[in-house]
Image (spheres, rainbow, N blue to C red):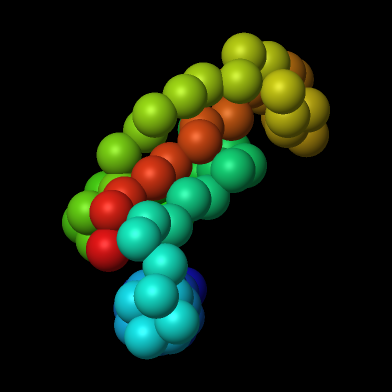
Amino acid sequence: RRQGVGRALVEHSLERARAEGFLAMQFNYVVSTNGPAVALYRKLGFDVVGTLPKAFRHGQLGLVDVFVMHRFL
């Protein structure tokens, strides 16, 4: 965490997807309580386009929502 690895992985994925001719990228299962991941994806241009209510069983919080996040390339 805080080493830039996540950002580098997502940026690389976006570059490869563009190079392969994809028009968009989507993350289908982003746990809503994973604040750092949600913040990173938002900074990189992703929007929440859907919510799966209580789709993830968090060890401490119980059932929490999951986001579907999308961005055009």
Q: Identify which residue, 27 or 32, lies in the foreground.
A: 27
Q: Identify which residue, 54 or 72, lies in the foreground.
A: 72
Residue 27 seen: yes
Residue 31 appears left or right of 43: right
Q: How many marks?
A: 0
Residue at 68 percent of width and 16 percent of height: 54
In which quarter of the view is residue 66 placed?
top right
- Rendered location of residue 23, percent (x, y): 35, 60
- Where 43 falls versus 70 (above or below)? below
In which quarter of the view is residue 21 placed?
bottom left
- Rendered location of residue 13, percent (x, y): 45, 77
Residue at 31 percent of width and 50 percent of height: 71
Q: Identify which residue, 62 or 43, lies in the foreground.
A: 43
Residue at 37 percent of width and 33 percent of height: 48
Residue 23 appears left or right of 68: left
Residue 3 seen: no
Residue 47 appears left or right of 51: left
Residue occupying the far top of the picture: 53
- Where 46 falls versus 63 (above or below)? below
- Where 42 falls versus 63 (above or below)? below
- Rendered location of residue 50, percent (x, y): 47, 24
- Rendered location of residue 41, percent (x, y): 34, 55
Residue 41 appears left or right of 50: left
For the C terminus, the image quarter is bottom left
